[in-house]
Image: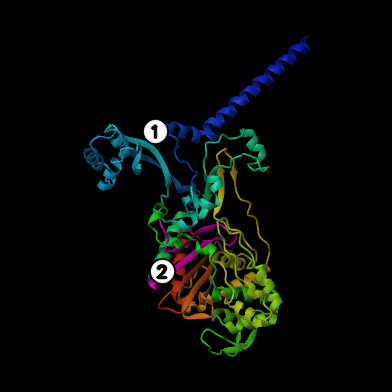
Amino acid sequence: MKSTYTTRIRLLSLFIFLFALLIIGKLYMLQIVNNEMYTNKADRQYSTTGTGVFSRGTIFFQNKDGSLVSAATLKSGFIITINPQILKDPETVYEKINALLPLDRDVFLAKASKKNDPYEEIAKHVDEAVGKQISALSIPGLKVYKDKWRFYPGGNVAAHTIGFLGFKGNEYAGRYGLESQYESVLARTDTAYVNFFAQIFSNIKQTTAGDSIKQEGDVVTTIEPTVQSFFQEVLASTTAKWNADYVGGIIINPTTGEIYAMDTYPTFDPNNTQVEKNIQVFSNRLVEDTYEMGSIIKPLTIAAGIDKGLITAHSTYDDTGSMMVNGKKISNFDGKARGVVDMQQVLSQSLNLGVAHVVRLLGNTQFTDYMYRFGLNEKTGIDLPNEGRNQVKNLEAPRDLEHVTASFGQGIALTPMSTVRALSAIANGGLLIHPHVVKKINYKIGLVDEPAIGVGDRVIKKETADEVSRMMVYSVDHVLSNGAIKLENYSVAAKTGTAQIAKSGGGGYYDDRFLHSFVGFFPAYNPKFLIFFFAYNPKGAKYGSETLTMPFSDTVRFLINYYEVPPDR
């Protein structure tokens, strides 16, 4: 009898526990997971028949202290409509509305004259205060419906990274940037969610093609808004000063791959994309387009020679100023001979013949192998859409010429992001990183997904990377701008580049159009920042050292002060 009583108590306790667990699960689903859906349903008492109130996840910037700032969010307001079948005295109604919300009189009256039409929108995205005032007019045939729309509080801040919403056919969804890349996470529907516990055990992953689990959440980026805003000012001023077609740049942690800022100028305001007449401004040139980068590729060539044990910083060769390769003349940037010089001067003076000498020591096959180790034959895998593929077929050519020109950044075309990834291996001790702009995803069910970035493959020895870094620091301290940008308490490594721009229809290069580039990192032997600039077709200066040295120097000083970077020397 006692055993039966005990069993009944246990069964009752189990039933109570399971019932409580069910209630808690239901409350969690109602208050947390589906809160947004039910809020929107409540809002629909103010909404038009058959339509819902727009909803979408948030994209955040992240301040240096870890706090979040909205980059793409929702703004609430109203849609103002009229029913021409009911509306009386349109002239008087127009005057009353126009006193609160300026409207085009002719457009309003034209819509009001459609007596067979029961619904005409006369204003969208109306602020809440104004919408409530219009509603208070209580005019028959005048209706105010609740509305939400995508809003970018920072305007053009990181616009190329964030992207925007737009129509493609009848589909209104993310176009460009993170809005497109993470459409499945940011989009919102009223579809009921699967059981909370099933979500947990599924680890938010679809296990079958028919799995209906919806991965809705918010996206937290690595973009630091203050750094991004400063960087955009630098890009804008550099574009204006040198009348460049456009200027772009990236600030990245060369060890973790986190991108703090990236953009090109001119840019756009995602709140007003309809005013842009040139849709090319929406493309992210740093990820999508390829360029012959010029002499910022030379550190990779020098690194290959050092890593293979064929040269050191003190190895010498006889620089004759020019040489013939497969019937083509290859020259230094100024055509002048330097005589016997060492590899340090090859990097500091940016001598084409010096890196051509390194390629001849390596041989074409080994040179190509090292360039591929630096990832030049693959995409970076950055978490942004439409990543371009590097044009490096010349590295597989049988002739010497293609390899020699590639050694100083001509004849191969790279995306800026791929270039930054490769050069980060010099900065971080020889590892290939995974550049990314998303820090984590906060899912609606309460779980957090932080992308498993991990450490990349080793492409050169740490000793090699350290030596090339030291050579680049020497160039900043003693050669670049005659040492004018040297910082006594900070080691800064850098390399400039200038490349001829290939003619769009083929047939060689323009004589008067150049791409200027600049890469640098600091503190040089434990870098937290790698900074990349490029300027397309600047005017009034021939070399990248003239146009991009000061923007780089200004950015270094800003980052030192903003992040309070301690001195390293």
- Asked if 343 appears above or below 240 in the picture, the reply is below
Q: Is residue 255 magenta?
A: yes
Determine the residue positioned at 45% across, 45% down: 73
Outermost top residue: 1
Q: Is residue 306 magenta?
A: no
The dot on residue 566 is none
Q: Residues within 10 Å of mark 1 (few under 14, many from 20)?
A: some
Residue 223 in view (yes/no): no
The dot on residue 239 is 2
Q: Which residue is mark 1?
A: 46
Q: Where is residue 486? Give x, y as percent.
A: 48, 73
- Asked if 466 appears above or below 224 in the picture, the reply is below
Q: Amino acid at mark 2?
A: Thr
Q: Where is residue 238? Give x, y as percent.
A: 41, 69
Give the residues drawn in magenta, as a range. Answer: 241-269
Q: Where is residue 122? Give x, y as percent.
A: 32, 43
Determine the residue positioned at 49% across, 74% down: 515
In the figure, is residue 40 to the left or right of 22?
Answer: left
- Dot 1 falls on a residue whose secondary structure is helix
Quadrant for the N terminus, please: top right
